[in-house]
């Protein structure tokens, strides 16, 4: 009897919550329904506009109650994380941002109210199509290319992706997630670029130091390991070898306080915005962890998490002599804003070091024809026996000043998955092959 009474009470409570929820929903819909619909319904039939890529290829258009996307399936899916959609399924697309604020803000010219307009994007839709085809065959992940002189996004692809026209079919799990802007990953050895900057500015004797690697290094009983014994190395060689044993020692010498300072200053712990679209903040050990954990954090493991966009900002600033041209989806000849993100002397040395990585190591495996490439690989252990493959860096070029970041989830070695992908993509974007 007692059991039945308890159950009856339980059912009554559920009924109460369902009713309360419905009342709340009706009230919210009445108060804010127009905003929810993002005014794409009949609310603002006057608005007209279109999104074009840097070559004038139409990606989306709206006007007189009509909403269109590209007629080409590949273009729609490959560019989905740039355009977003009219339904707000992806909250990080330009369309969502543009339209959501079209009532009181002119996305093109600044602040005045404007309801008609053509938005020229810096993105090259053909590059997105090409990148999507490459990445989709590798699995999940993202690739993003930025003009480091102007800040224009030239390419942004995230896989899996969705077709904005097809709202009936079930989309793949996490397809609406923009992995370049809204995801964070364990950075693996790409993080050595940050540790290197901290070391260059903290350790006066860094460049004359020697680091011996026997394949493993013991800190307070905890073993830091490399895949092979790298022997005696300079700092420059240790970065090119991506030697964990050397970078463990370097990180401990830099100390946690200065590591945290650099990670913070370079923006890895903050979310950022690109045309008002928010990006994800990363993670780094902030409370005292002791030398072994600190060593792991300096080689991009521990609790480190990095948003691909944050890594791209950092390497773009290195490429541009320490000055970040603020990233933007809009086509522009001049950066909207510039920030001194990295000290000029540090940026200059990192450029050389990243060039040396490619010349002394990566080019043994991939030739990168026609590209003066500066880069760093990352093979980020996920703890589940798999690794995310990272490749980040930039091309030294006056005509194609491109910085890039690529992550292939569970792609194994950085150079094999992400490195091969970036080379293929840059051959297409820079050399037209
Ligand atoms: Zn080593």
Image: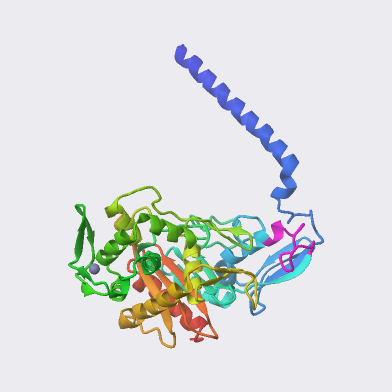
Q: From this view, report whether residue 185 is shown above or below residue 116.
A: above
Asked if residue 258 is among those painted magenta in the image, a careful observer would answer: no
List the single residue furthest toward the front.
Answer: 204
List the single residue furthest toward the right.
Answer: 46
In which quarter of the view is residue 366 placed? bottom left
In which quarter of the view is residue 54 placed? bottom right
Q: Position of residue 31 (x, y in %)?
A: 74, 41
Q: Position of residue 380 (x, y in %)?
A: 35, 62
List the single residue furthest toward the bottom.
Answer: 370
How are the colours assigned in the image? rainbow
Q: Is residue 158 visible?
A: yes
In which quarter of the view is residue 77 placed? bottom right
Left or right: residue 146 compared with residue 121: left
- Residue at 66 percent across and 59 percent down: it is 97
Asked if residue 99 is among those painted magenta in the image, a careful observer would answer: yes
What span is colored magenta in the figure?
98-115
The total of numbered circles placed on residues is: 0
Q: Position of residue 362 (x, y in %)?
A: 33, 79
Left or right: residue 61 compared with residue 64: left
- Residue at 48 percent across and 57 percent down: it is 183
Which residue is more in the foreground, 65 or 100?
Answer: 100
- Residue at 30 percent across and 61 percent down: it is 253
List the single residue furthest toward the left.
Answer: 214
Q: Is residue 393 visible?
A: no
Which residue is more in the foreground, 221 or 180?
Answer: 221
Q: Position of residue 8 (x, y in %)?
A: 53, 19
Q: What secondary structure predominates along the stretch shown in magenta? A: loop
Q: From this view, report whether residue 387 is shown above or below residue 146.
A: above
Q: From this view, report whether residue 34 is shown above or below residue 320.
A: above
Q: Quadrant holding ligand 1?
A: bottom left
Which residue is more in the foreground, 415 or 307?
Answer: 307
Left or right: residue 417 compared with residue 58: left
């Amino acid at each position: 009897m007692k059991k039945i009474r308890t159950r009856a009470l339980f059912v009554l409570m559920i009924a109460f919550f369902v009713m309360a929820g419905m009342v709340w929903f009706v009230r919210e819909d009445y108060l804010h329904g127009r905003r929810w619909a993002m005014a794409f319904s009949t609310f603002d039939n006057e608005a007209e506009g279109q999104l074009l890529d840097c070559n004038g290829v139409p990606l989306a258009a709206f006007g007189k109650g009509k909403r269109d996307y590209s007629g080409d399936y590949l273009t729609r899916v490959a560019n989905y994380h740039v355009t977003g959609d009219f339904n707000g399924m992806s909250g990080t697309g330009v369309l969502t941002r543009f339209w959501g604020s079209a009532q009181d803000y002119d996305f093109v010219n600044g602040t005045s109210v404007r309801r008609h307009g053509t938005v020229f994007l810096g993105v090259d839709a053909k590059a997105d199509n090409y990148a999507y085809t490459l990445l989709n065959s590798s699995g999940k992940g993202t690739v993003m290319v930025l003009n480091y002189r102007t800040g224009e996004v030239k390419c942004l692809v995230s896989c899996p992706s969705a077709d904005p026209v097809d709202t009936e079919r079930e989309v793949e799990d996490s397809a609406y997630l923009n992995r370049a802007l809204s995801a964070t990953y364990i950075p693996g050895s790409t993080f050595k670029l940050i540790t290197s900057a901290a070391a260059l500015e903290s350790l006066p004797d860094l460049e004359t130091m020697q680091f011996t690697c026997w394949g493993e290094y013991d800190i307070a009983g905890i073993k830091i390991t490399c895949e092979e014994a790298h022997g005696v190395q300079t700092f420059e060689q240790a970065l090119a070898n991506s030697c964990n044993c050397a970078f463990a020692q370097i990180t401990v010498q830099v100390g946690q306080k200065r590591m945290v300072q650099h990670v913070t200053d370079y923006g890895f712990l903050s979310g950022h915005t690109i045309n008002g679209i928010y990006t994800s903040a990363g993670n780094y050990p902030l409370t005292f962890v002791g030398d072994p954990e600190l060593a792991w954090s300096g080689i991009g493991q521990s609790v480190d998490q990095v948003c691909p966009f944050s890594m791209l900002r950092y390497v773009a600033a290195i490429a541009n002599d320490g000055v970040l041209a603020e990233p933007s989806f809009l086509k522009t000849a001049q950066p909207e804003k510039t920030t001194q993100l990295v000290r000029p002397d540090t940026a200059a040395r990192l450029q050389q070091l990243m060039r040396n990585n490619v010349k002394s190591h990566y080019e043994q495996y991939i030739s990168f024809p026609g590209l003066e490439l500066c880069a760093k690989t990352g093979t980020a252990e996920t703890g589940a026996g798999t690794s995310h493959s990272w490749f980040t860096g930039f091309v030294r070029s006056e005509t194609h000043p491109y910085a890039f970041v690529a992550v292939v989830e569970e792609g194994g070695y950085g150079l094999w998955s992400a490195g091969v992908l970036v080379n293929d993509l840059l051959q297409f974007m820079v050399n037209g092959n």
